[in-house]
Amino acid sequence: QQQVKQSPQSLIVQKGGISIINCAYENTAFDYFPWYQQFPGKGPALLIAIRPDVSEKKEGRFTISFNKSAKQFSLHIMDSQPGDSATYFCAAYSGNTPLVFGKGTRLSVIA
Amino acid sequence: KAGVTQTPRYLIKTRGQQVTLSCSPISGHRSVSWYQQTPGQGLQFLFEYFSETQRNKGNFPGRFSGRQFSNSRSEMNVSTLELGDSALYLCASSLQPRYYNEQFFGPGTRLTVL
């Protein structure tokens, strides 16, 4: 049972463009929604996270949009750069569950 | 401050063998979690340890086990290896259990089962 569904599996974006990755969840008890960035040969690193009491959180070029009624959240990377090329994972958590991850999106930003 | 270290970084085993992976958390971190990462299933939670006690276990067979030592270092063991156990095994540490906003991952151990 996959509790967090992530799309797309892969994404190619032009340099300077906007990268958008979407996730949907099922468990309404989830109350923490982080995004992770993983480069080859490295472990995932926390990028940005949101709680369901806000609809948007922005940190630099990275923005999370959260839609509680639709049980969806998304990561937007503005002005995408080649250095953003990595695999991105969404995740979700509640007090009663460990982190549950989406299956990941491989982002390639091309010049 | 040194990050999370995992040893070995790469491992090749054959079916039926057993393997032990090691994780040294960031100094001062007492909680260690283990995850399995595969292309098909993504990242899946294995178990979480805090103060030498297993706090949570994911949906994995009993062949997967772990432990934590008094210095917070942790090991995980997989017995009777199967081809499907080939994966990147990631360890993450934090001060307390489920402090996900301050949880840091190691680089992982790449296990290949032949």
Image (tube, coloured by chain):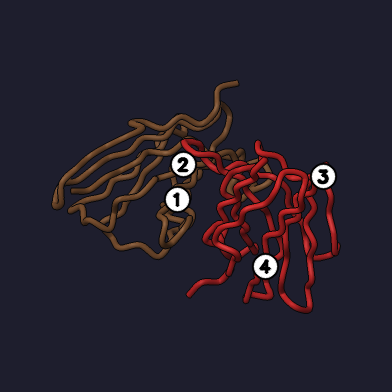
Chain colours: A red, B brown
Q: Is circle 3 on the same chain as circle 2? A: no
Q: CA distance from mark 3 to mark 1?
A: 27 Å
Q: CA distance from mark 1 to mark 2?
A: 6 Å
Residue shown at the point (65%, 45%) measured from the top left: A109
Q: Report the front residue among B85 and A93.
A: B85
Task: Please state if B59 lies on the left or on the right of A76 as rendered.
Answer: left
Would you identify the image quadrant in which residue A71 lies? bottom right
Residue shown at the point (36%, 35%) measured from the top left: B22
Sequence-first tag of 1 and 2? 1
Secondary structure beneath dot 4 equals loop
Secondary structure beneath dot 1 equals strand
Residue shown at the point (50%, 32%) measured from the top left: B25
Residue linked to disc 2 = B91
Q: CA distance from mark 3 to mark 2?
A: 26 Å
The image shows residue A36 at horizontal and vertical percentages of 62, 48
Residue linked to disc 1 = B35
Q: Is circle 1 on the same chain as circle 4? A: no
Residue A59 has which mark? 3
Tag 4: residue type?
Phe
Can residue B45 be seen here? The reply is yes
* Above or below, comparing residue A96 to residue A28 in the picture: above
